[in-house]
Amino acid sequence: MTVPYWKWSAADLAKAIRQGSVSSQEVVQAHLERIETVNPAVNAVTVVLSNGAISAAKAADEKAASGQTLARLHGVPISIKENIDIAGSATTHGIASLHGEIAATDAPVIAHLRRAGAIPIARTNLPDFGLRWHTDNDLHGATRNPWDASRTPGGSSGGEAAAIATGMSPLGIGNDMGGSLRYPSQCCGVTAVKPSLGRVSRTITSMFNDPPTFYEQVACVNGPVARHVRDLRLALDIMSQPDPADPCWTAAPRLGSSMPAPVRVAVSDDPSGSGGSATVAQGIRKAADILANAGYQVEQVAAPHIADSTNVIHQIADTEIKRYLPTILPMMSKDGRTVLERLVGDEPADLSHYTNAIAQRYRIASAWNLFMEQHSLVLGPVSAMLPFEVGYDVAGPELLETFVRSMALTEICNLLGLPSIAVPVGVVDGLPQAVQLIGPRFHEDLCFDAADTIEQHCGVITPVDPVIS
């Protein structure tokens, strides 16, 4: 039985197009038809770029037929979160009043991917300004988790994760300032990497004139979402090309450098010490056993300053958000406003707390550098909770605080600029399980190698047809 193209990996599609066994037009058309079939059930894709994608696929096939050298993603469709500039498409950030903000040029990461032959096929959904861990807004509505519509697909790259999980795209591009790539991956059963700070251009849009705040500069990164770890490697290497306009971009070794075996792994199934799902913990122990059997040196060791980092992030990010809160709140949906107002609280901004928190970040980073001299990888949860039920994050401030604590290990990666990858480890009671692997800065290679090992043992659990309740 022939496997439909929408089930293929991005790497396999690129190889087949290069070899001439399949055309880009066939691949693009298969994904357009898949979007038409399944998107009404999940509402992950917001805009279908069909005309441009079909034209680009035709041009890709003509180039292939001419015998020219083909780039690594030649003719492969990709999807892009709706807060990243694509020339000729609106960068809405999920905000109704921004529906007409058409980008004049591609963001640098999109330009890199186009030069590698990728073809943008769709835009995907996100919460208001990407400031929520559930994907919903007044412009496009809610994205539904394809495994269980009563559960969140995650956020803020929830549209991307749901699109990849259902075969509407083989490769997606999103961003992450507090788990926005990795949490949707946990919820939807796909894989995603948050690169090191400086690995990839962090520029997403030319829409805003103000430069990014301190926390946005150190914590927010662009990264890929896929179903296969090898697709993440391929995409990240392409996305890591220079951006002279981004002072954070660093000419680091390509995806890391060698490190002697055995690689030591610190394991924590409840990093914040506040309790969590037994199912999530079971998945972490499963991944630990897989790595141990593969020759990794696995130890149950607590990573440093997890609770402290949550407080530091709160003091830095909330102080900065309060500066522009009056501007963005009127533009947001009711639920988006509720979550953001509860996250930042109603206390006035305190400069001494803010500057002290920035200083504490240095102390935490130093402790992690020393810790990772002894443990090159950290294995733990993305969220220590199962994907929450839709409405949970607006049901009360205590529940929102519980969820934030469950994300402590994930958010410390943003605070410190560390690379991390979310990878599925199976399905339990109809929901995907996932774990997170964290490496030293610019050692995405260690994360990829360990994630590959887990994927080879557990298999790839998507694409899936949406479960219709």
Image (spheres, rainbow, N blue to C red):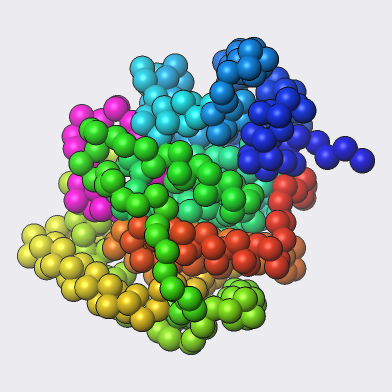
Pick the front one: 353 or 124: 124
Q: Residue at x 59, y 50 (%)?
A: 230
Pick the front one: 52 or 465: 52
Figure quadrant of residue 203: top left
Give above or below for 172 relative to 25: below
Q: Residue at x 46, y 79 (%)?
A: 264
Q: Is residue 112 shown to the viewer in this render? A: yes
Residue 421: image location, x then y, percent:
49, 59
Q: Which residues are magenta?
A: 204-222
Give above or below for 20 relative to 44: above
Residue 168: image location, x then y, percent:
67, 36
Q: For the view shown, which residue lies furthest in the right direction?
A: 1
Pick the front one: 391 or 26: 26
Q: Where's the N terminus, which quadrant?
A: top right
Q: For the view shown, which residue lies furthest in the left direction?
A: 352
Residue 176: image location, x then y, percent:
41, 50
Figure quadrant of residue 101: top left
Q: Residue at x 71, y 29 (%)?
A: 19
Q: Is residue 47 shown to the viewer in this render? A: no
Residue 6: image location, x then y, percent:
73, 36
Q: Is residue 399 magenta-colored?
A: no
Q: Is residue 210 magenta-colored?
A: yes
